[in-house]
Structures are given as structure tokens and as C-alpha cells.
Image (cartoon, helix red, strand yellow):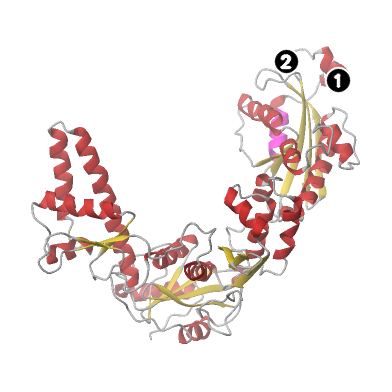
């Protein structure tokens, strides 16, 4: 029997609201405004040849919202073959608006929209050159090329070609292209909508997924997107399983169903992900209150299930640690587990940890003693690092530039390790940290972190009194006792997830170890909060969370 998809109880019953949207959540294609544009020109060279006509259609949710059509006055003569192809007569351009006037109008018409064109490289190249020549700032908007999209969506041999007229006829457009700007733009609208409809059942729901869609997945595999229909729509974790129930891949997302469906669009170009989707027979999900809980559950599932297609994070305790010598030893100890309270790490490789120890010994002229090591690791002194910098300068002054450069790189790596280590250790040393992020519809996402580990999470509903809900979340939180090592038993990845969540959105520090603290935006350092309790009270009041002493 397959292992049930469960999680450790980090969320308190009764506070299981799901945060359905974040600022980072990309809008659905039905919510995206497209401006479909087509140009007629005197030739094929942007910046040299001229635009003679612009046609544009502004659409959203499958509906036409506005249209723009205008001739453009040109400086040169209209070539005869262009006139015969388009039906535009030189007299049509007499008295037409100048290119500068047309660009002002078009840029306003297309403001905030995604530009779409058939062979977008051609049309956008002319528009970009026109903006430059008329002293307009080109906004460099996102774009979609229906020519490129059709080549990825339609099966080989399905159409005679991918010209606009051929696609319009094949896809059932109600408009027949005729080499006139507005008419061709209208036909391109129909082609765009038909292509979006084709890929909608394959997990394509956003602009990013549409632009990345790759039809190389077999049709029978793409049709398995229906496996994701029952997944949660909000934050959480998803798990692909094979026919025998074995775990293939675990991931997390702010929108689980949308993310899981995207694998069936071919948007993920990694060959191993294509293989994984081909093997998947079912998809499951775990709803979470917010992304921090999702990341925590994801890491725990990967650690326990060891899915073969998760190459990263399969060992959350990976890395190497450097500890001071013990007993009569004179060399630093390099180990996989940081049992010593002053162990430094994690280093990516064991040789990096050994090199750091040797560099310190050579710089100081003697192995660091226990007191000096603790002062270095905990950031109470930078004497050893400064001595390394002086040594680098001396080596460079002696002309050994390559040797100095190698030592410089190792010293920089050591400084990064020290900085990250001290940041993680500071969070791990806090007995309890209660965090809150504003969610959609005036909700609050709450996380209780104890010694660097997520102990509980939940949602304060809109209109609810925050303190009773937060008290309930705290009361049901997992008890976390500090463990061995520099991070009180937490893994570096667990604490990094907390920092990552804090940095992902404006975050309030509601309380530290049971006392009300300063709200901060993306800050990890917690020292100094107690000296400014009055300011904390004022700030938390403005946040809608009444401060109180505990």
C-alpha cells in the first residue's frame, strides 16, 4: 500500500483557513489584457522602412474591448508592389497622422497590456524602432507570438503551413486576413483564442505557462491533466505517484492545482520532468495555511519519501560542519552532523571546511583556542578575518597574485558562511517567534516558530479579533525543545525557509518569546526590540493587532 500523503500537525484545528492568493500569484489568462496588433509597412527593415498602417484590437476574457486603426504618413514613396499587395493607395497616406502622433496613441492604447502579433519579431521590431525615432520610451511589454505558439501547439502535418491565412482558415476564424492591418489583427485575435482553447485542457492557465507551452508531450499524457482536478486551489503541497503508489515527485506552490496542471502543458523543459509526468498515475495534495507551512511539509515529505525525481532537498541535513579540536587533537573536526554547539557551517564540501581551518591556522600562526573559536563563530570578534585580509594584501604585495586571489576567494566564502551561520543561529536561539503576514481579503497568515522550526500555522479571518485566534494557534503549537548543535536541533533549511517567508512579503513580528515586539518588513535581526516597547505598541495597533504584555 502507498504511504498516505499526510503531514505533521503544524496547524491548529479550527484555524485552517486557506490563503488563496498572494501578490506573487500570476493572473489567469482570462484576466490578462491583450492588445493584438498588425502593421503594414513599406518593407521588412525596422528603422529603415516605414509603417504605413496600424491596426490593433484590445481584448480581455475573450471579449473585444476596443479597436484602433489608422494610416500613417510616410516620408518616402509607397512601393508599387506594397500597394498592390495591401490595396493601400498613396493617396490614402496624404494627410494621415505622423508617426509620432500614431505612436503616442498606440502606446496609450496598449498601456498595461500584453502585445500579440503574428510573427511578433517583425511587428514589435518596427514598433520599437518607431518609438525610438519619435522620442517615445518603449515600455518593452510582455508579448506573445501566435506564429511561434501555433508551431508548438498544432501537431506536425495538421496544417499546410503557419501563415496567418492558413491558420485562420484551419482554426475557424470568422475573419479572413487580407493584408490590411485591422482585418489581420482581428483574424489574429481569433487565432490566439483558438490556440489558448487548445491548450487550456493541458494545464495552461497563465501567460507564463502559455509562452512556455511545448507540445512535445504525447497527447495522452497531456490529457492526464484531469488528474489535478481535485487538488486544492490554494497554497499547499502536491505529490505525483506512479501506478504502484510510489512517490515520484513532491513540490509546493501558492496555487497547487495550477502548478500541478502546468506539468501537463510541457512548460517544464527538464527532460526528467517530462519522464516523471509520463509515469504519474495519480496526483495528491495537502492544503496548507500559507507558503511557510507548504515549504515545511514539502521538505518533510521529501526527506521521508525520497522521491526519485526530487534532486534537490532530498537530504535536508546535507552539508559539512567544522568544529574545534577536541581532546588532544590539533585539527578541526569536519563532520556531517553539527553536534558541537560551536560547529560552523554548513559548507557545501568537506574540503571547503578543511581549507577554512587551514587558512585560519596559517593566518593566526596557531590553531584557534576554544574561546577564540567561539568568538569568531558567534560574531563577537572579526580579528581572524581581518588578519586574513592583511595576509592577502601582503601576499599580493609580494607579487604572488594568483595565490592571493585564491586566498581571497576562500576568505570571501568563509565570511559568507559566518554571516549565514550567525543569522540562522540567531533565529534558532529564539524560544518562540510569532509572525504575521497580510493575506487576501483582510486576513492574516500566522506562523509560530520555535527554535527555528515551524510549530503551528493558521489564518486570522477577516473581521475576527486577532488576539484570540493567535492565542489559539499558539496554544495548539508543537512543543519544541532546543536540541544539540549550533541551531538548537533545527536544520539549516528549516530556518532558511522561515527567513525566505519573512522576505517574501511584508511581515509583522507579533511577539518574541511571548512578549510583544516590533513589526518588521523582511528583517531577520531580532535584537533591540525590548528597548522600544512603546513604538512596538503603536505599530502593532496600526497593524490591527492590539499589543499586550504576556
Q: Is residue 146 left or right of residue 289?
A: right
Q: Is residue 338 left or right of residue 255?
A: left
Residues at marks 2 and 1, CA–CA distance in whole angstroms = 20 Å
Residue 372 falls in image quadrant:
bottom left
Q: Position of residue 132 (x, y in %)?
A: 61, 27
Q: Which residues are magenta?
A: 101-110
Q: Is residue 89 visible?
A: no
Quarter of the rendering occupied by the N terminus: bottom right
Q: Residue at x 32, y 59 (%)?
A: 420
Image coordinates of residue 389 in percent, x first then y, are 18, 45
Residue on which disc 2 sits:
75
Predominant SS of the magenta segment: helix
Is residue 451 depicted above or below 147 in this figure? below
List the residue tagged with mark 1.
85
Q: How many marks?
A: 2
Position of residue 226 measured from the top left corner of the image (x, y, whole percent): 74, 62
| Number of other residues with Cα within 10 Å of mark 1, as a class: few under 14, some 14 to 19, many 20 or more | few
Of residues 254 and 486, the one drawn nearer to the viewer in this rendering: 486
Q: Is residue 502 visible?
A: yes
Q: Secondary structure at mark 2?
A: loop
Where is residue 367, by image quadrant?
bottom left
Q: Tell me what residue is drawn at x 62 percent, y 31 percent.
A: 136
Q: Is the C terminus in the top left, top right, bottom left or bottom right quadrant?
A: bottom left
Q: Which mark is residue 27?
A: none
Amino acid at each position: 500500500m502507498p504511504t498516505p500523503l499526510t503531514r505533521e500537525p503544524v496547524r491548529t484545528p479550527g484555524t485552517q483557513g486557506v490563503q488563496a492568493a498572494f501578490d506573487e500569484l500570476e493572473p489567469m489568462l482570462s484576466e490578462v489584457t491583450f492588445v493584438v496588433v498588425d502593421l503594414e509597412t513599406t518593407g521588412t527593415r525596422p528603422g529603415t522602412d516605414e509603417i504605413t498602417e496600424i491596426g490593433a484590437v484590445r481584448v480581455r476574457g475573450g471579449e473585444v474591448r476596443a479597436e484602433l486603426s489608422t494610416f500613417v504618413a510616410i516620408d518616402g514613396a509607397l512601393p508599387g508592389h506594397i500597394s498592390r499587395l495591401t490595396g493601400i493607395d498613396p493617396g490614402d497616406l496624404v494627410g494621415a497622422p505622423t508617426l509620432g502622433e500614431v505612436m503616442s496613441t498606440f502606446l496609450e492604447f496598449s498601456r498595461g497590456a500584453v502585445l500579440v502579433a503574428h510573427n511578433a519579431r517583425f511587428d514589435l521590431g518596427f514598433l520599437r524602432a518607431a518609438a525610438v525615432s519619435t522620442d517615445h520610451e518603449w515600455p518593452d511589454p510582455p508579448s506573445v507570438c501566435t506564429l511561434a505558439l501555433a508551431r508548438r501547439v498544432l501537431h506536425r502535418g495538421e496544417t499546410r503551413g503557419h501563415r496567418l491565412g492558413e491558420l485562420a482558415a484551419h482554426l475557424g476564424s470568422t475573419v479572413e486576413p487580407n493584408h490590411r492591418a485591422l482585418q489581420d489583427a482581428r483574424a489574429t485575435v481569433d487565432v490566439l483564442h483558438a490556440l489558448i482553447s487548445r491548450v487550456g485542457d493541458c494545464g495552461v492557465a497563465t501567460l507564463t505557462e502559455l509562452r512556455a507551452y511545448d507540445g512535445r508531450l504525447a497527447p495522452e499524457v497531456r490529457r492526464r491533466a484531469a488528474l489535478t482536478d481535485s487538488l486544492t486551489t490554494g497554497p499547499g503541497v502536491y505529490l505525483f505517484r506512479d501506478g504502484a503508489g510510489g512517490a515520484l515527485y513532491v513540490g509546493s506552490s501558492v496555487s497547487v492545482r495550477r502548478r500541478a496542471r502546468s506539468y501537463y502543458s510541457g512548460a517544464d523543459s527538464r527532460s526528467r520532468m517530462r519522464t516523471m509526468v509520463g509515469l504519474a498515475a495519480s496526483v495528491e495534495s495537502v492544503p496548507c495555511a500559507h507558503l511557510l507551512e507548504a515549504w515545511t511539509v514539502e521538505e518533510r515529505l521529501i526527506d521521508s519519501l525520497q522521491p526519485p525525481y526530487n534532486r534537490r532537498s532530498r537530504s535536508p541535513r546535507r552539508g559539512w560542519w567544522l568544529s574545534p579540536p577536541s581532546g588532544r587533537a590539533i585539527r578541526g573536526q569536519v563532520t556531517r552532523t553539527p553536534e558541537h554547539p560551536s560547529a560552523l557551517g554548513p559548507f557545501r564540501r568537506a574540503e571547503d571546511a578543511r581549507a577554512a581551518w587551514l587558512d585560519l591556522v596559517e593566518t593566526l600562526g596557531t590553531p584557534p583556542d576554544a574561546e577564540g573559536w567561539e568568538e569568531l563563530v558567534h560574531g563577537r570578534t572579526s580579528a581572524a578575518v581581518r588578519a586574513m585580509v592583511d595576509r592577502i594584501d601582503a601576499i599580493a604585495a609580494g607579487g604572488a597574485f594568483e595565490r592571493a586571489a585564491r586566498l581571497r576567494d576562500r576568505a570571501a566564502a568563509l565570511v559568507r558562511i559566518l554571516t549565514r551561520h550567525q543569522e540562522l543561529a540567531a533565529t534558532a536561539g529564539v524560544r518562540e517567534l510569532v509572525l504575521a503576514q497580510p493575506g487576501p481579503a483582510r486576513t492574516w497568515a500566522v506562523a509560530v516558530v520555535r527554535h527555528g522550526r515551524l510549530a503551528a500555522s493558521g489564518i486570522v479571518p477577516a473581521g475576527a479579533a486577532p488576539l484570540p485566534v493567535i492565542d489559539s494557534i499558539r496554544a495548539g503549537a508543537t512543543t519544541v525543545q532546543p536540541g544539540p548543535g549550533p541551531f538548537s536541533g533545527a536544520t539549516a533549511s528549516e530556518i532558511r525557509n522561515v527567513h525566505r517567508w519573512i522576505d517574501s512579503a511584508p511581515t509583522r513580528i507579533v511577539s518574541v518569546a511571548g512578549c510583544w515586539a516590533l513589526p518588521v518588513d523582511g528583517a531577520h535581526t531580532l535584537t533591540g526590540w525590548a528597548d522600544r516597547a512603546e513604538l512596538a505598541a503603536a505599530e502593532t495597533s496600526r497593524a490591527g493587532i492590539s499589543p499586550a504584555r504576556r
